[in-house]
Image (spheres, rainbow, N blue to C red):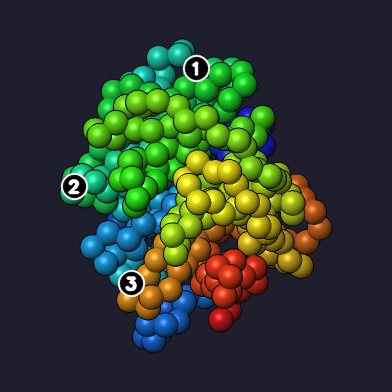
């Protein structure tokens, strides 16, 4: 779980950063396909915990990819990706180091746009020896740079790990809701944000859904709330994506099962995001996985970001996804 993995992540992300930090903007994948209905070959680039959003017709992905920095990847066609950033650097956020600890890690961001302003939410790990925290930074464009609000938005405690923020603007109530938590303790919390998007108004008490570990995401489809999340251990084949459906953004959750799970050589799919592609009128899921591994783990090396199409049956249930490589 996240409370035990920070030393491994430090080495991994330092290597990744050193290999790619020579340029602030870098093409990371080019594929010569022109059919708008096609998807690129998986995986698309190295990274984990990919949060995807569409801004002005452009796909933007914000992954976990460097020890103390966040980068963004953008594409107009899903095939050609450019890395920009860092969009946020921990050295520019004073409060992160006010606890006196030297080691902090940039995990699992998300982003939302409101009235032309972009709000970037991010995890500061690890949980021990000081509690994990969630910060929020503000920018004028999806590429940042994002300027931190000056204080943590949410701080964990011994019973709650403040990680994996996901902000969902409810299309019905128009309220901004922060979903967070998981990993050690596997506890979910939900909060209503103020209109300025950088303060919490109140906590909304919810039950933690079945098989919840971490990595929450909420999307709205045909007047139902689809609450999805990761289950299992992040370095093992048990890591998988599950979901539940509700009539409200707070539950009660009607558990529906597994969306993504390991196969023979593609392991630990998880920490995902859903996005609707207006050009093709289809839903997509972005997720990470371990490629070319066997056994149950623990795996070592790099995780990669992948894309699959999401389809629903006549009852509105998500059809379990079979992972792809060369399409």
The reply to whether discs 1 and 3 touch (Cβ–Cβ < 8 Å) is no
Taking 255 as reference, is 75 left or right?
A: left
**Label disc, if present, on residue 101 of the rendered structure:** 1
Would you say residue 120 is visible in this rendering?
no
Residue 294 has which mark?
Answer: none
Mark 1 and mark 2 in contact (Cβ < 8 Å)?
no
The quarter of the displayed image where residue 134 is located: top left
Pick whichever, 71 or 250, lies toward us: 250
Distance in Å between CA atoms under marks 2 and 1: 37 Å
Give the residue number, with chain letter if any, for mark 3.
278
Which residue is outermost to the bottom? Answer: 35
Residue 48 vs 90, above or below: the answer is: below
Q: Position of residue 257 (x, y in %)?
A: 68, 57
Query: Residue 320: x and y, percent?
Result: 64, 68
Instruction: Judge by depth and name the residue closer to the eye, 150 or 20.
Output: 150
Give the spatial CA distance, label 2 vs label 3.
Answer: 20 Å
Instruction: State the mark number for residue 115.
Output: 2
Pointer 3 local density, CA inside 10 Å: few below 14, some 14–19, many at least 20: few
Label 1: few (<14), some (14–19) or many (≥20) C-alpha neighbours in 10 Å: few
Quadrant location, the N terminus: top right
Crowding near the residue tagged with mark 2, few <14, some 14–19, many ≥20 C-alpha atoms within 10 Å? few
Where is residue 4 shown, x and y percent of the image? 67, 31
* Disc 2 to disc 3: CB gap under 8 Å: no
| Above-or-below relation of 47 to 29 | above
Q: Residue at x 44, y 64 (%)?
A: 222
């Amino acid at each position: 779980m996240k409370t035990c993995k920070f030393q491994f992540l430090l080495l991994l992300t330092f290597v990744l950063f050193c290999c790619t930090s020579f340029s602030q903007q870098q093409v990371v994948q080019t594929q010569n396909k022109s059919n708008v209905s096609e998807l690129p070959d998986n995986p698309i680039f190295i990274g984990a915990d990919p949060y995807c959003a569409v801004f002005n017709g452009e796909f933007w992905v914000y992954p976990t990819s460097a020890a103390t920095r966040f980068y963004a990847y953008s594409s107009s066609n899903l095939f050609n990706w450019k890395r920009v950033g860092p969009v946020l650097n921990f050295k520019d956020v004073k409060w992160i180091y006010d606890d006196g600890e030297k080691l902090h890690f940039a995990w699992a961001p998300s982003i939302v746009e409101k009235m032309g302003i972009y709000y970037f939410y991010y995890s500061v790990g690890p949980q021990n020896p000081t509690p994990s925290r969630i910060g929020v930074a503000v920018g004028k464009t999806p590429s940042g740079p994002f300027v931190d609000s000056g204080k943590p938005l949410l701080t964990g405690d011994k019973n709650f790990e403040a990680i994996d923020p996901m902000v969902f603007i409810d299309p019905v109530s128009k309220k901004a809701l922060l979903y967070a938590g998981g990993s050690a303790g596997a506890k979910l919390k939900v909060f209503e944000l103020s209109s300025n998007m950088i303060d919490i108004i109140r906590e909304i008490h919810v039950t933690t859904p079945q098989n919840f570990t971490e990595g929450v995401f909420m999307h709205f489809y045909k007047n139902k709330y689809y609450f999805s999340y990761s289950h299992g251990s992040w370095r093992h084949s048990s890591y998988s994506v599950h979901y539940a459906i509700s009539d409200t953004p707070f539950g009660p959750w009607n558990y529906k099962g597994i969306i993504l799970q390991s196969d023979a050589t593609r392991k630990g799919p998880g920490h995902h995001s859903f996005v609707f592609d207006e050009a093709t009128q289809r839903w997509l899921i972005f997720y990470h996985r371990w490629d070319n591994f066997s056994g149950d783990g623990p795996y070592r090396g790099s995780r990669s970001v992948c894309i699959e199409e999401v389809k629903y049956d006549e009852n509105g249930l998500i059809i379990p996804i079979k992972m792809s490589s060369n399409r």
